[in-house]
Image (spheres, rainbow, N blue to C red):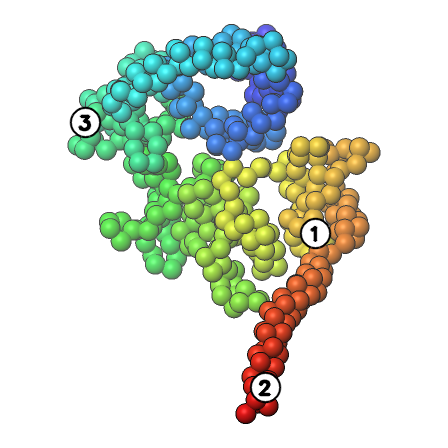
Amino acid sequence: EQHFTQPPPRFSEASLVKRLEELGIGRPSTYASIIKTLKDRLYVRVEKNRFFAEESGRLVTAFLERFFEKYVGYDFTAGLEEELDDVSGGRAQWQAVLAAFWRDFKPRTSEVMAFQPSEVTAALDEFLGAYLFPDTSDGSDPRLCPNCGAGRLALRGGRFGAFVACSNYPTCKFTRRFAQGGGAEASGDTGPEVLGTDPATEMEVSKRSGRFGPYVQLGEGKEAKRASIPRDLPGDLDLDWALKLLSLPRTIGPHPETGAPITASIGRYGPYLAHNGKYARLTSTAEVFETGMNAAVVKLAEAAAGGGRPQRGAQAPLKLLGQHPRTEAEIKLMEGRYGAYVTDGTTNATLPKTIDKDALTLEEAAQLIDARAAAVPPKGKKKPAAKKKAAPTKTPAKAATKAPAKAKAKPQAKLKAKPAPAD
């Protein structure tokens, strides 16, 4: 019987917390903030409740392990946790603990800050060599450029992040995204793949790969139109999907209140809605082409209530349940500080312990939201009371200023009237 080795399973939130407990890193009060930081800084993404390392996460980890190995070691971190426990328990002075930490850490940061960017990139290129350039099955040099056959591949840093490039640049323009890693699938930019012809313009549509990732292109030369291929689309996307991406932004229609157009598109941080300079995040590329007017208006209102443009580190939902049967607002299952809850962007409803979140249906979620909305009294009815309180404070002030003036005027009249009989 043939056996194959399998990579270790990816962490879920529960298994990651369990591993942290085993290593003595963190405490029950800090586990949630640790996971939140990983998500907020886009070090990881979550797919099907499993963590996947993002490009920024790999780079930060490599940088810290290469230049601050002592401070990211499990033993050092666990030992520091125990010292902090002593501080909170009154067994140690926090000034002494921080002074001991800073004594070695400050000189090391000064050393690292003195390095040139090229020196840091070269060190990371060597440190990440096994990931970026794994051994080939035929024994050939994994760093040999597959395009020109003469240049050497190496890690480079650019305005939009790290990437792999040929040493013969600009003669050879081979590039590969850092996120691709190495291996057979990381072929880089070896030439366009023709997908078909655009019926409207009769120009060729091709799929290509550049230093910022895969993209589709309509036409050739300076006038060519390009669109990046989002990560949630299949790598073998067809002509129809390519034309959809090239057609963006998509106009949904005029806003019912302002008359200004609502558009859907894909930007640097993912899919979004736009209206009059305001934005709302969408959760998938499919939503860019499927979101209707009612849902768009609700999402924009939700984003505006939350302070305008959504934050990059917004918490990802556990599950998208669908649109509310009455309001058409997107209902999401979220994980909060006190447990799971459902939300339509306006009303949050905690999930009862009697309902299994994995088996939750759209109908159950809508009923919970409706019940919660009915139980919460409407807001914004206290403004008239504020006006009544302001009125009495002004009236006494006016009376107080006029009264002394009248009192002074009467004595003056009497003084002028007394000399008359003397004449």
Circle 2 packing at 10 Å, graded few (<14), some (14-19), many (20+), is few
| First along the sequence among labels 1 and 3 | 3
Check disc 1 and report the residue beneath it.
324
Circle 3 packing at 10 Å, graded few (<14), some (14-19), many (20+), is some
Amino acid of disc 3:
Asn
Which residue is more in the foreground, 254 or 352? 352
Q: Which mark is residue 417?
A: 2
Is 56 left, or right, of 225 in this rendering?
Answer: right
Instruction: Give the position of the N terminus as an image quadrant.
Output: top right
Residue at (24%, 26%) from the top-left corner? Answer: 166
Q: Are marks 1 and 3 in contact (CB under 8 Å)?
A: no
Can you give x and y, in whole percent of width and height, for residue 203 in the image? 32, 54
Residue at the limit of the structure toward the front, as seen here: 422
Can you give x and y, in whole percent of width and height, for residue 376 in the image? 76, 51
Which residue is more in the foreground, 283 or 381? 381
Can residue 326 be seen here? The reply is no
Residue at mark 2 to residue at mark 3: CA–CA distance: 111 Å
| First along the sequence among labels 2 and 3 | 3
Q: Is residue 55 above or below residue 279?
A: above
Can you give x and y, in whole percent of width and height, for residue 369 in the image? 74, 48
Q: Is residue 420 above or below residue 133?
A: below
Amino acid of disc 2:
Ala
Circle 1 packing at 10 Å, graded few (<14), some (14-19), many (20+), is some
SS for callout 1: loop
Is 202 left, or right, of 12 in this rendering?
Answer: left
Residue at mark 2 to residue at mark 1: CA–CA distance: 86 Å
Is 311 left, or right, of 123 in this rendering?
Answer: right
Residue at (82%, 34%) from the top-left corner? Answer: 354
Residue at (19%, 22%) from the top-left corner? Answer: 150
Residue at mark 1 to residue at mark 3: CA–CA distance: 56 Å
Check disc 3 and report the residue beneath it.
168
